[in-house]
Image (tube, rainbow, N blue to C red):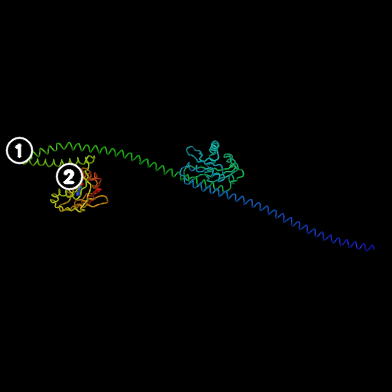
């Protein structure tokens, strides 16, 4: 009985032991499952943390990007404004606080070196009171060598840059009352250099590389704008100087012209009064000579008669000279008013040719006139006839016998042009202007033989110009000359 109980107990114990073992195995398995689960949970936790971190970084990058885009827009607007400004002071005025705020800074200063005072001058002041800016200026000038070195390196520095030392950064932040800053040199190619400071008091704002890039671009553009302004200023000054010089010269020339006019008037008055004085004795000489020649006071020996005839002829020539001189001076002084009326030029030319027909015949010179039937001009007929007499008379004088003279009249726009050509000796080029001056005669063999006063063409020129016309000559030595003049056609 006892052994049955014992065996049964042992069996029960064995079964229990097996059951226990099985349970333990299960617990072990469960423990491992729990461990696995814990590991998974830890991993998931890690990943969740990573996701949050990445998300935060993404947000930050997005923020950076937004900031950069706003900054770029602002920079673009600012660039456009400063690149179209051509005055140094105005360029700095363009940088207003709103642009700076868009770039993420509420404070800014701009300094340029002034060689005369050997110090920096403040051109931009954003975010500082008058006193504060004065304080900054003093500090900048007290440390001018540091800033001059910075300009020399042409490098932008910031509170975040690793290259610059901490004490310098702290010093700058103290000077400008900021927590973050960027300083970028302003280096125009010529002229005064300087630097641009931008900063913020905000503690949470860190200056990024992107910010440094933007401010460097801005300072480069300011440098270029300063160059443009200087170039413009130089050009403007040169222009002003030129204008002043032109004005001064014009003034001097006006004075000189007034003087010339005064002298010319004095000369005309002198010639006019001398001619008048000469006319009276001339008339009496001629009168007495005529009386004597007419032998009203008794018969004259032939020798005396010959000399009296000479006196008479020379008095006529002198009277002609005096009359021409008087006429020129009267026309020049405006005392002769051209009695302008409508005339057919053909009649005037015929009148002049008729007067000269004897001389033409004598020298066997052929004269032809080519002109439209009607060429009406509004002129003083008597004066224009004198013009033709002088021009044709000269042509006869300076053309060898059997030569040709041709007159052609044609319309030239609103004018009538008259060309009188001859086959005479021609006029040297250097004399073509001077022949219209009083008393000028070309020195040549013909002139040594042929008498003349050198007044004919001066009178012609004065008459033509008093009709608002113009006269000139073209010529070829040995081949002939063409005297041309234009007269305004009748309205
Ligand atoms: P003058 O005939 O009394 O010398 P003018 O004033 O009429 O004075 O002419 C000035 C000069 O111009 C003349 O002396 C002459 O040398 C030159 N001249 C004028 N007409 C002609 C011409 N048709 N051919 C050549 N020379 C001329």
Which element type, helix, strand or loop, lies under badge 2?
loop
Q: Which x, y percent locates residue 206?
A: 60, 46
Residue 399 visible (yes or no): yes
Residue 25 occupies quadrant: bottom right
Q: Nearer the viewer, residue 2 or 176?
A: 2
Look at the numbered discs 1 and 2 and tell me whether their residues touch, using CB distance below 8 Å: no
Drawn side of residue 352 relative to residue 112, left or right: left
Which residue carries the number 1 mark?
298
Residue 491 tag number: none
Question: From the Cβ of disc 2, is ligand 1 less than 8 Å away?
Answer: yes
Q: Nearer the viewer, residue 128 or 138?
A: 128
Can you name the residue that lies furthest to the left here?
Answer: 299
Drawn side of residue 241 relative to residue 179, left or right: left
Q: Which x, y percent locates residue 81?
A: 49, 46
Q: What residue is at 37 percent from the left and 42 percent from the top?
A: 243
Q: What residue is at 20 percent from the left and 41 percent from the top?
A: 327
Which element type, helix, strand or loop, lies under badge 1?
loop
- Quadrant where the N terminus sits is bottom right
Q: Nearer the viewer, residue 81 or 132?
A: 81
Residue 441 visible (yes or no): no
Query: How would you rate the neighbour count of disc 1 (Cα within 10 Å): few for under 14, some for 14-19, many for 20 or more?
Result: few
Q: Earlier in the sequence, mark 1 or mark 2?
A: 1
Q: Which x, y percent locates residue 287?
A: 11, 38
Q: CA distance from mark 1 to mark 2?
A: 35 Å
Q: Which x, y percent locates residue 388?
A: 19, 48
Q: Nearer the viewer, mark 1 or mark 2?
A: 1
Drawn side of residue 431 relative to residue 152, left or right: left
Which residue carries the number 2 mark?
452
Q: What residue is at 58 percent from the left and 50 percent from the top?
A: 66
Residue 280 occupies quadrant: top left
């Amino acid at each position: 009985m006892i052994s049955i109980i014992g065996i049964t107990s042992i069996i029960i114990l064995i079964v229990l032991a097996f059951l226990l073992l099985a349970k333990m195995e299960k617990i072990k398995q469960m423990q491992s499952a729990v461990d696995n689960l814990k590991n998974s949970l830890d991993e998931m936790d890690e990943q969740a943390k990573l996701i949050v971190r990445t998300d935060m970084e993404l947000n930050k990058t997005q923020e950076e990007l937004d900031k950069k885009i706003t900054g770029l827009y602002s920079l673009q607007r600012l660039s456009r404004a400063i690149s179209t400004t051509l005055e140094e002071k105005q360029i700095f005025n363009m940088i207003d606080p709103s642009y700076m705020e868009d770039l993420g800074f509420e404070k800014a200063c701009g300094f340029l070196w002034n060689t005369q005072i050997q110090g920096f001058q403040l051109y931009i002041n954003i975010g500082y009171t008058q006193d504060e800016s004065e304080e900054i200026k003093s500090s900048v000038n007290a440390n001018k060598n540091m800033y001059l070195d910075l300009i020399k390196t042409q490098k932008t520095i910031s509170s975040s840059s690793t290259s610059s030392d901490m004490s310098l950064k702290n010093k700058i932040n103290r000077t400008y009352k900021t927590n973050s800053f960027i300083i970028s040199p302003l280096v125009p190619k010529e002229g005064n250099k300087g630097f641009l400071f931008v900063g913020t008091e905000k503690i949470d704002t860190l200056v990024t590389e992107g910010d440094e890039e933007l401010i460097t671009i801005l300072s480069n553009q300011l440098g270029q704008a300063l160059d443009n302004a200087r170039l413009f200023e130089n050009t403007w000054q040169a222009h002003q100087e030129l204008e002043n010089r032109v004005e001064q010269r014009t003034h001097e020339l006006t004075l000189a012209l007034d003087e010339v006019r005064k002298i010319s008037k004095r000369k005309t008055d002198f010639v006019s009064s001398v001619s008048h004085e000469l006319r009276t004795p001339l008339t009496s000489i001629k009168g007495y000579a005529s009386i004597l020649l007419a032998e009203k006071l008794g018969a004259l020996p032939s020798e005396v008669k010959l000399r009296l005839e000479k006196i008479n002829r020379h008095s006529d020539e002198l009277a002609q000279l005096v009359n021409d001189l008087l006429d020129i001076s009267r026309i020049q002084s405006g005392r002769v008013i051209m009695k302008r009326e409508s005339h057919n030029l053909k009649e005037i030319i015929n009148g002049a040719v008729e007067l000269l027909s004897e001389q033409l015949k004598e020298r066997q010179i052929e004269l032809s006139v080519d002109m439209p039937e009607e060429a009406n001009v509004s002129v003083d007929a008597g004066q224009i006839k004198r013009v033709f007499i002088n021009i044709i008379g000269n042509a006869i004088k300076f053309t060898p016998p059997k030569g040709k003279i041709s007159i052609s009249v044609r319309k030239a726009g609103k004018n009538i042009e008259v060309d009188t050509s001859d086959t005479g000796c021609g006029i040297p080029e250097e004399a073509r202007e001077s022949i219209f001056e009083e008393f000028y005669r070309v020195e040549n063999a013909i002139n040594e033989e042929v008498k003349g006063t050198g007044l004919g063409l001066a009178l012609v020129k004065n008459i033509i110009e008093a009709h608002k016309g113009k006269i000139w000559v073209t010529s070829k030595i040995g081949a002939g000359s063409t005297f041309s003049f234009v007269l305004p056609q009748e309205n």
